[in-house]
Amino acid sequence: MRAILLLLAVLLAVPAQAQAPSGPTHGITILGTPALPPDFPNFPYVNPNAPKGGEVVLGALGSFDSFNPFIVRGTAAAPVIRVWETLMRGSLDEVATAYCNVAQSVTVAPDKLSVTFEIRPEARFHDGKPITADDVVWTFDALRQHGRPTYRQYYADVDVAVADGPRRVTFKFKTALNRELPLIVGEMPILPKHWWEGRDFTKPLSEPPLGSGPYKVDKFDMGRSITLKRVEDWWGRDLPVSKGMFNFDTIRTEYFRDGTIALEAFKAGQVDLRQENIAKQWATAYDFPAVQRGLVRKEELPNKLPTGMQGFVMNTRRDLFKDVRVRQALATAFDFEWANKNIFNGAYTRTRSYFANSSLETTGVPQGAELALLEPYRSELPAALFTKEFNLPVTDGSGNNREEIRAALALFAEAGWTVKDRKLVNAAGKQMSFEILLYEPAFERVALPYIETLKRLGIDARARTVDPAQYQRLTDIYDFDMTVAVFAAGELPGNELATYWTCVSVKPEGGENLAGACSPIIDDLVNRIIAAATREQLTSAVHALDRVLQWSWYVVPHWHLRVSRVAWWDRFGNPGIPVRPGFALDTWWLDPTRAAATDAARRAR
């Protein structure tokens, strides 16, 4: 639900408070002033004259049983989020910047203790009723009281939302230190209060919801397919933040239980476009006749997104993973170089930082302001954190990672685990045993070789792949030992870090603190990041947090890639203008000439 916000080319290390406009404005940013002027006609990365029409068919894995993506219960159809609009729309060119959408103006109070939005008089729900301040207040209260824990954590510093009039709403803050709050409440989807009256917001929704966005749910086969239809008389179609976007008449998403079947559906022309996240498939599975004939295109679109951290995350709610030496040993045993060579065709780079590929990735040893932040906790942190640069083991890729195995065994021994009769056991003679929970069979090819390495250490490790709905439920209630997780990062991190790593996010069901991390040190550093008033303060605090997370060994780090792999049947046009995320479907359109040629070729097969 969160957008990964990105950094401007030049960062001004000045207090954010000094940069805020003094009155109503067309956009807001955490970094100085928005790049686009008040009279900008459209975003620079769109074709404002893009033709409307046609259909795009997408594929998704798993299933769905709800149209309510805001609550823990049920598995929501992902495309349904397009149904609702937000007060502001984020820019794909700028970092932490959004422009007025449902709101016609936004005003941040000089003392930073509130933000006020004036709602456009033309803004309407699909039933014709106007979007009002009462709808905004009702949505905020519903999400904070009944929504996923992420909403409660994100809105924790909001005191109250107040309707100052039919089209004027003010969010009052508990503190002026949380610089992201105006943007956070501005990107909140607005739900229709009148439609939800008489319906239970806490339960999965089985009927198409009422929205205000460019699309509405047209057809669906619960669990299998959902079709969104463009609203032709949509109130927001001529807004500068909407021109050149949302061009397809229909967006149909077909759900598949298995990734292999989804790929075959694409090859057969049943799916028009797909993003590929498996390196081996990208290298070997796209040499089929339609590609050879030029009917299918594949491209690596460079992105400028910080990659964050992906890895096997260990659930420290389990006693087994409470000892940091055990976690470090398990990370030490993972042979990335072998996996990269034999599974990924050498496509990936190992991830060592939670802010990888950004200016906030920590290197070397702590110095200056960062050291000052860490110094009060010196006795509670590993001594090596202050004297050694954090690095991960590097093997020769042969699969004979004996040195790393010995290092892992030494760490296990320090934690009280020894090998007896080829089993790694504790003082009570119980063998180390755990399960790696997966939601996609493709991850088995990574997990299974890792499990073989763990068996050499005497560990009884197993992999279990479940369907996405079951996976969601198990992770919502933290009923897993180890799983694959992604901790997204931007170059201006803030409130999302509280949902990943702080004590308050450990217990709420459906939260994002999968590791179960709870440390006063981490809490302090996250709070400092959220409250940072200058770029220097932010950088020092993020470097310190990155270093503490690294040496806490919550994950077995995986890998990253700096491009978006996209393959599509050649029936579309796009602006050809790079965007920071690499790929932005909402800026594409159907090219009638290309589509006719593609359709003819499909029929001739």
Image (cartoon, rainbow, N blue to C red):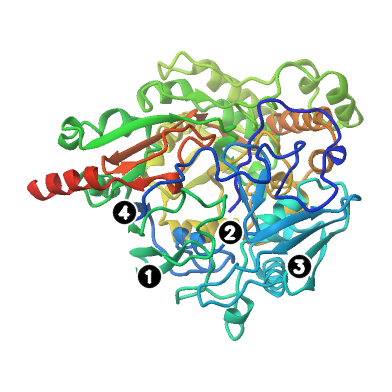
Determine the residue positioned at 46% across, 43% down. Answer: 584
**Residue 190 at x, y percent in the picture:** 62, 66
Q: Nearer the viewer, mark 1 or mark 3?
A: 3
Q: Which residue is mark 2?
A: 476
Q: Which secondary structure, mark 2?
A: helix
Along the viewing direction, whichever of 519 and 536 lies nearer the viewer: 536
Q: Is residue 289 left or right of residue 371?
A: left
Mark carried by residue 57: 4
Frontmost residue, 15 versus 249: 249
- Element at badge 1? strand
**From what the image shows, is residue 370 above or below residue 583?**
above
Q: Disc 2 marks which amino acid?
A: Asp
Total numbered circles: 4
In percent of width and height, residue 462 lies at: 45, 44
- Asked if residue 232 lies left or right of residue 545, the reply is left
* Relative image position of residue 21 (x, y in whole percent): 82, 45
The Cα atoms of the two marked residues, 4 and 3, are separated by 39 Å
Question: Of marks 1 and 4, which one's residue comes earlier in the chain?
Answer: 4
Q: What type is the residue that disc 4 sits on?
A: Val
10 Å neighbourhood of mark 2: few (<14), some, or many (≥20)?
many
Q: Residues within 10 Å of mark 4 (few under 14, many from 20)?
A: some
* Amino acid type shown at disc 1: Asp
| Residue at the disc numbered 1 | 218
Compute the Cα span from label 1 to label 2: 30 Å
| Numbered disc in front, either 2 or 4 | 4
User: In the drawing, does residue 558 fall left or right of residue 280?
Assistant: right
